[in-house]
Image (cartoon, rainbow, N blue to C red):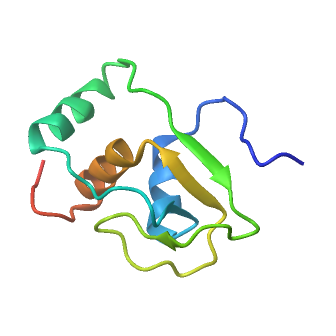
Amino acid sequence: MTIYEDTNSKPLLDLLDRIHTGDMVLPDFQRDFVWEPSATQALIVSIPNNYPAGSILRVRDRQRAFSSREFEGAPPPTIEHTFLVLDGQQRLTSLYQAFYGVGDHRY
């Protein structure tokens, strides 16, 4: 078994649910969330229009090689995580906050 996932699309709601439960977390060395509300708004608009929104790189973390933390605005994990997100944190955090109604801004 490999630590890398396939390149198939994953449903957005599945990804956001994994963030909410703590199954998908960030390595502690990742920078903090810094997106402006206008960037989040543009990303939200791109979803129903099927515009490309970039890719997400996540890795299985069975060996717990790095310290981890939850996404900004997400509750502390309720389960032991499966994935670390190495790329895509800003997009996922902004979508999580928008769809779950957390954070400083409402969309």
Relative to 101, residue 99 above or below: above
Front residue of 86/107: it is 86
**Image check: 89 left or right of 15?**
left
| Residue 23 vertical position relative to residue 99 in the rendered view, above or below | below
28 left or right of 101 in image: right
- Image x and y of residue 93, in percent: 33, 53
> For this view, does 63 lie left or right of residue 25?
right
What residue is rendered at 41% in x and 57% in y? 30
In the picture, residue 72 is in which quadrant? bottom left
Q: Depth check: 28 or 51 in front?
A: 28
Residue 106: percent from left, percent from top: 10, 54
Please provide percent x and percent y for residue 100: 29, 61
- Which residue is at the far right? 1
Q: Residue at x 50, y 78 (%)?
A: 77
Q: Is residue 3 above or below residue 46?
A: below
| Residue at the image position 69 percent from the left and 62 percent from the top | 61
Residue 40: % across, % down? 20, 40
Q: Residue at x 17, y 64 (%)?
A: 103
